[in-house]
Amino acid sequence: MIGENIKNYRKQKGYSQETLALQLNVVRQTVSKWEKGLSVPDAEMLEKLAEVLEVSPGELLSKTSSPDAAGEKTEPAEEPNTSEIANQLAILNENLAMQARNRKRALQLIKKILLGLLIGLAVIILLVTLASKLLTFQKAAEEARLTTTKITCTVDGVVQSYTILSDGNQTILSAEGSPWFDETFQADGYYGHAGEYTVAIHDYCLENNIPCEMEEIDHP
């Protein structure tokens, strides 16, 4: 209300905010705050402002400051005295202060919400990172796990033994023992996978009625 009145009467006088501020001995930002409703002048400044704008303090405090249809300014029904002006200004200042406090609380709430979201996001990223590392360590541990397969077959009354060392992916790391195994199964090709190798031995022994036992030992 008062901010709009100050702006309207200033423009009617052809004053800029800078010009009005110089006449009131204040900075331009002060006039800008008055017109934006961010603050109001005190009673003494209101009197000086009314004098510079050539209006009454009541006109600055009235609900309307624009000229009527005949081009004349609407006068308030009764001019308030200095005490009433001070009281109205005090009420306006209290309302502005309350609005400022509410804005401050809202900003603080928004900051807390944003901080909470950032903390939550950081926790999620940390958990995902830890889970990824855990899976990597688990996979590495599985790949590093060693298994020894001991094979014992009786061929024409002769016991033939063989051991196959493989990792967690069943990749053959070493295979050694009786030459019979290499001589018999090299003809069928090289087996890089421990599972394929043991299945081939098992099937061959089964087809040829060769007693064969296999035992797997996991290394800790």
Image (cartoon, rainbow, N blue to C red):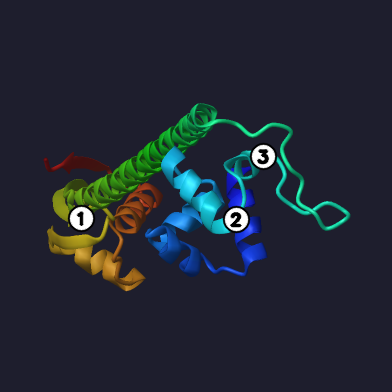
Closer to the observer: label 1 or label 2?
Answer: 2
Q: Residue 54 carries which label?
A: 2
Residues 202 and 7: in front is: 7
Point 27% across, 65% down: residue: 184
Quadrant in which the N terminus appears: top right
At label 1, which amino acid type do we have?
Ser
Question: Is 178 placed left or right of 61 in the picture?
Answer: left
Residue 135 % position (x, y): 29, 48
Measure how far apart labels 1 and 2 are at the Cα level: 101 Å
At label 3, which amino acid type do we have?
Ser
User: Badge 1 is on which residue?
Assistant: 166
The mark that comes first in sequence, 1 or 3, is 3
Residues 197 and 25: in front is: 25
Please say if 6 is above or below 17: above
Residue 73 % position (x, y): 76, 51
| SS under mark 1 | strand
Question: Is 85 placed left or right of 70 in the picture?
Answer: left
Q: Residue 200's quadrant in the figure?
A: bottom left
Quadrant in which the C terminus appears: top left
Q: Which mark is residue 62?
A: 3
Q: Residue 140 carries which label?
A: none
